[in-house]
Amino acid sequence: MKTFLIIGAINAMMAVALGAFGAHGLEGKLSDKYMSIWEKATTYQMYHALGLLIIGVLSGTTKLDLNVAGWLMTFGIVFFSGSLYILAVTQIKILGAITPIGGVLFIASWVMLVIAAYRM
């Protein structure tokens, strides 16, 4: 499905750009703890961008319906990585409570991919 190829590619691009920004633009401005949080956000965004690309390719080459998995993964990036980016720059700790929602969405998306592959 073209949608998930596009969303995956955009997220991969954003992960690279935000990783570079973190390494160069935030260097010396954030403590090691918050730099680590920023790096975790970029890492998970990239992993799941690649997951979206896989979903896009599989959707186009098989009869698998992976829409739910793709959207769960997309919103997982928003909740997980998005909350960590904001947490890192604002240091508002309550934002950390949003991050697990993204983690659950990630897990659910991978489960949906496993189920779809099993049905193949």
Image (tube, helix red, strand yellow):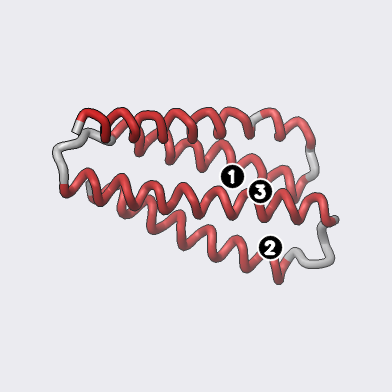
Residue sitting at x 62%, y 68%: 20
Using a 10 Å C-alpha cutoff, classify the residue at mark 1 as few (fewer than 14 neighbours), some (14 to 19) or many (20 or more): many
Residue sitting at x 84%, y 66%: 28
Instruction: Find numbered disc 1 in the image and state the secondary structure of the residue it sits on.
Output: helix
Give the camera-side residue of 10 and 61.
61
Q: Which mark is residue 58?
A: none
Instruction: Find numbered disc 2 in the image and state the secondary structure of the residue it sits on.
Output: helix
Using a 10 Å C-alpha cutoff, classify the residue at mark 2 as few (fewer than 14 neighbours), some (14 to 19) or many (20 or more): many
Is residue 28 rendered to the left or right of residue 10? right
Residue type at the position of mark 3: Tyr
The quadrant of the image that shows the C terminus is top left
- List the residue tagged with mark 3: 85
- List the residue tagged with mark 1: 81
Which circle's residue, 2 or 1, is located before the other in the chain? 2
**3D distance between C-alphas at marks 3 and 1:** 6 Å
- Cβ atoms under marks 2 and 1 closer than 8 Å: no
- Cβ atoms under marks 3 and 2 closer than 8 Å: no
**3D distance between C-alphas at marks 3 and 2:** 10 Å
Q: Give the percent coordinates (x, y) of residue 63.
A: 14, 38
Which circle's residue, 3 or 2, is located before the other in the chain? 2
Q: Which mark is residue 22?
A: 2
Residue type at the position of mark 1: Ser
Q: Give the percent coordinates (x, y) of residue 104.
A: 53, 28
Give the camera-side residue of 111 and 39.
111
Q: Taking 6 as reference, is 105 above or below it?
A: above
